[in-house]
Image (cartoon, rainbow, N blue to C red):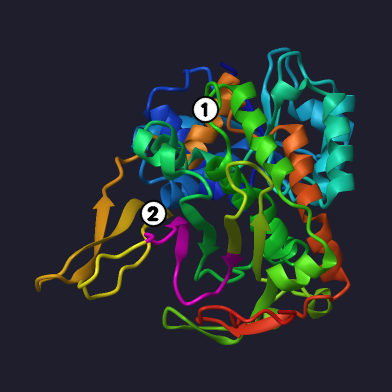
């Protein structure tokens, strides 16, 4: 296990809200040694003492689920070095030492290439690892180039293209429900499943993230990485094991099986929109174009939806819908599996017989199955929902993610070819949207989103 973690972009939101609390959770669970060090770096003109003071405040605010002694241990282990992550001399000074370390690039994606170049010239110690947050590149070409750069610095198994979605307990339960239950796996195909919705709808609006979000939008921010990762877990063939190679191979197979989208497909199977002024959860929300830092001429979408079909024996005929939106009226974060209706309902019964629906709640974590049962009166049908309480996770998602990185387990990180396949899949959508083949709709903040009718449909 590596005992040094260098965070470039150490005073940013990612470090404050997720990385430091994740480390505190690891410390509380006994996963970190006394010798563990946090090396913070960015352009802030801070001393190590100032960084520790800031880190303590962030852990008080975001990491209070961990005991005070664990938080204090993380704060005490931290030191700071002012550095320009694109400058090899600064980077070499920030990571000085012969022992291997994990370098976490908690940076805007636009800086990844320059940062990796600087790390290459700074000469990382042997055995070191590099972590990159999503999105990995801006498009297919940039992803290919970034993979090439990384291959010159560290081996592929030392590159962690992380997605904290894959560290969620419920996401793992998707695999567990499928692969450890004969009943479900026997039904897990297009003969029984009509469609799958993978949804991340949130009430949260821009919340001061224009610097990143306005250059990305919902398609790149959520669909290209997070939701495609969930698609892979739902649709993959059973792997031989959950080891690095077997799991990742099957995920890539799913992306390769997605039917390529033509311009006509994009027109009829995708939607894009951005929120206008409205009220969310009792609070006024300005229109996206009026948010501070937004360039209205970019045409950035805050809502994206795409329907996909897989050309495979298992899934031919099933529709997969991926959707994500901001500033919506309710939070809906789930994988919904809709089964086909039964072929015959016995004569003489009344009441609606709805198709079975299996829901994996992502946040909060839950599991529910919608069935049809008997009603209160004889010979009637009525809906019935079975729910299960999920066991509390031993670690938060970023704690699990950091543990995998520090111990060198890349099974749940994204392999280079998988990152490229995800971009290749969405290239036709990005191209068609850039040519305005799909109009940019608008929906009021606090609503259910844009009209279900597609402009091209």
Of 359 and 238, the residue lying toward us: 238
Residue 65 horizontal/vertical position (percent): 35, 44
Residue at 42% over, 55% down? 363
From the viewer's perspective, tell me whether residue 169 is left or right of residue 379: right
Residue 211 figure quarter: bottom right
Of 124 and 135, the residue lying toward us: 135
Give the answer, above or below, for where 125 lies relative to 298.
above
**From mark 2 to mark 1, how far is it between C-alphas?**
31 Å
Give the answer, above or below, for where 181 lies relative to 194.
above
Give the answer, above or below, for where 444 lies relative to 50.
below
135 in magenta: no
Q: Label 2 crowding class (10 Å Cα cut-off): few <14, some 14-19, many 20+?
A: some
Total labels: the figure holds 2
Q: Label 1 crowding class (10 Å Cα cut-off): few <14, some 14-19, many 20+?
A: many
Range shown magenta: 324-343
Residue at 53% over, 60% down? 199
Of 382 and 32, the residue lying toward us: 382
Judged by depth in the image, the label closer to the viewer, 2 or 1, is 2
Residue under pointer 2? 358
The quarter in which the N terminus is drawn is: top right
Residue at 50% over, 38% down? 167
Residue 128 horizontal/vertical position (percent): 71, 20
- Residue pushed farthest front? 347
From the viewer's perspective, tell me whether residue 396 is left or right of residue 402: left
Residue 380: assigned label: none
Residue 82 horizontal/vertical position (percent): 75, 39
Residue 96 horizontal/vertical position (percent): 75, 21
Visible residue check, residue 82: yes
Counting residues from the start of the chain, the first of labels 2 and 1 encountered is 2
Residue under pointer 1? 403
328 in magenta: yes
């Amino acid at each position: 296990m590596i005992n040094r973690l260098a965070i470039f972009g150490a005073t940013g939101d990612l470090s404050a809200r997720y990385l430091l609390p994740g480390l505190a959770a690891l410390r509380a669970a006994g996963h970190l040694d006394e010798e563990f060090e946090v090396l913070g770096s960015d352009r802030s003109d801070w001393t190590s003492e100032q960084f520790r003071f800031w880190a303590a405040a962030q852990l008080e605010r975001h990491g209070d689920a961990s005991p005070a002694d664990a938080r204090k241990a993380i704060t005490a282990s931290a030191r700071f070095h002012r550095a320009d992550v694109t400058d090899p001399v600064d980077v070499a000074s920030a990571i000085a030492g012969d022992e291997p370390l994990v370098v976490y690039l908690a940076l805007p994606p636009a800086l990844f290439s320059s940062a990796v170049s600087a790390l290459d010239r700074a000469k990382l110690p042997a055995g070191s690892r590099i972590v990159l947050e999503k999105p990995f590149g801006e498009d297919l070409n940039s992803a290919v180039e970034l993979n090439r750069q990384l291959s010159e610095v560290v081996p592929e198994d030392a590159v962690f293209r992380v997605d904290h979605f894959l560290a969620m307990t419920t996401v793992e339960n998707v695999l567990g429900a499928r692969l450890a239950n004969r009943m479900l796996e026997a039904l897990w195909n297009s003969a029984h499943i009509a469609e799958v919705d993978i949804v991340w709808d949130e009430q949260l609006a821009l919340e001061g993230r224009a610097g990143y979000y306005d250059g990305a939008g919902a398609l790149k921010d959520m669909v290209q990485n997070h939701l495609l990762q969930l698609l892979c877990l739902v649709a993959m063939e059973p792997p031989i094991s959950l080891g690095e190679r077997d799991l990742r191979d099957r995920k890539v197979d799913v992306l390769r099986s997605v039917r390529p989208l033509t311009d006509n497909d994009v027109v009829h199977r995708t939607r894009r929109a951005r929120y206008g002024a409205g009220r969310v959860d009792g609070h006024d929300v300005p229109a996206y174009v009026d948010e501070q830092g937004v360039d209205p001429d970019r045409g950035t979408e805050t809502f994206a939806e795409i329907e996909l079909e897989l050309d495979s024996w298992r899934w031919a005929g099933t529709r997969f819908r991926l959707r994500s939106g901001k500033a919506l009226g309710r939070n809906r974060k789930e994988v919904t599996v809709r089964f086909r209706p039964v072929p015959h309902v016995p004569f003489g019964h009344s009441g609606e017989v709805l198709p079975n629906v299996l829901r994996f709640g992502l946040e909060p974590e839950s599991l529910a199955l919608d069935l049809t049962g008997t009603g209160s009166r004889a010979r009637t049908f009525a809906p019935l929902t079975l729910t299960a309480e999920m066991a509390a996770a031993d670690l938060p998602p970023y704690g699990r993610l950091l543990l995998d990185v520090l111990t060198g387990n890349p099974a749940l990180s994204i392999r280079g070819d998988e990152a490229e396949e995800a971009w290749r899949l969405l290239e036709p959508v990005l191209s068609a949207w850039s040519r305005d083949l799909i109009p940019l709709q608008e929906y009021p903040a606090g609503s259910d989103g844009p009209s279900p009718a597609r402009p091209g449909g």
